[in-house]
Amino acid sequence: MPSDRPLAIQFSDLREFTAITEERGDEEAYRLVRQFVDLVESRVSGHGGRVLKTYGDGVMTSFDDAAEAVECSIEMQDALCAEYCQGEETILSAGIGLAWGTAIRTDDDLFGSSVNLAKRIADVAKGGQIVVSSTVAEHSALVESDRAFRDLGERPLKGLGEHRLYELVWRNEVAKLETVRDDIEFVLTEENKLVIEFAKEAREQLEEVQAELASLGAGESGLAGRIKRAVGGRLARKIPNVIEWAAARSGMGTEHALKDVDVRLDGGSLSLLIGGRKKMDLSGKEIDLAKAKRFIEHFEALKRRAEEST
């Protein structure tokens, strides 16, 4: 039934889950999903929230108090990283989206624009990120809270238009660097770690775009239809190359001790080496090299301080 009483709506989605399923098989993937759902349920109940439903590799929850939803989201990310994000390979990471507003309530579900907004925000969040609507950030500012929010600006959300979004900063960050595509972010923390945050699985998003492009102009006659089909087909054929680009960067762990990391500018590219084996190279087209240089300066200073303290 409709309600005038607002609530916080949270969606949490696993990242790179299709790749995990392909690599480890259905049974292991299902076991990991159950572990993720159990983790979410334990944290949500401790903050007065309720789990409404699970959907594939995600969970939908709600809270009567936005501040409790914020704290719960932080606990969820912290617990996930403590359990699954250490070392060279990440097993699980999740993006979390939060919105605040009214909704039509049933016994075990919610419907309405606020629900749709929360789901689209979760799609934007990278693995390890918490992204919230402007209403959540504003509500948190009205209560006693030392939580920091980073303004992400106006972001286009599929089917919902432009919305101003904020990232809830839950780690002790020293420096941050993002790719031009905004599909990967690198974060240095005061705990002497490099954190790599990957966007929602690129393969699924790009395959959806590919299908839309391939159907462009379908059923339309005349010159306009032929042009649309030609352009759509040409762009659609380029998508697999982009999918391969994204897949090559998956499978790299989320959190790494700085002692195991080497970052440098090499021939106009940013080169990242982890554990002497996992490597990622990003060209000047993929990353702002001036920002990368400043990031490396922070990295070297932080790593040097860590080495001196041991």
Image (tube, grey):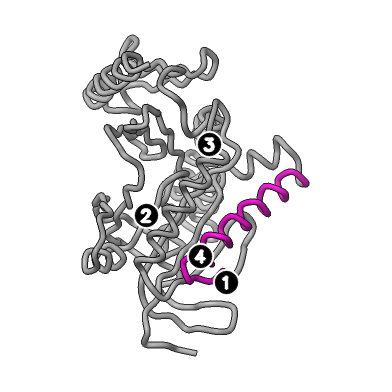
Amino acid at pointer 3: Cys
Mark 1, residue position: 52
| Mark closer to the chain start, 2 or 3 | 3
| Mark closer to the chain start, 4 or 3 | 4
Residue range corresponding to the magenta coloring: 27-51
Residue 279 location (% of width, % of height): 49, 18
Task: Give the Cα distance between marks 3 and 1.
Answer: 26 Å
Q: Residue drawn 41% across and 39% down?
A: 183
Q: Nearer the viewer, residue 304 or 4?
A: 304
Mark 2, residue position: 131
On whether residue 152 falls in the magenta region, the answer is no
- One can see residue 261 in this view: yes
Amino acid at pointer 2: Val
| Mark closer to the chain start, 4 or 2 | 4
Task: Give the Cα distance between marks 4 and 3.
Answer: 23 Å
The numbered dot on residue 85 is 3
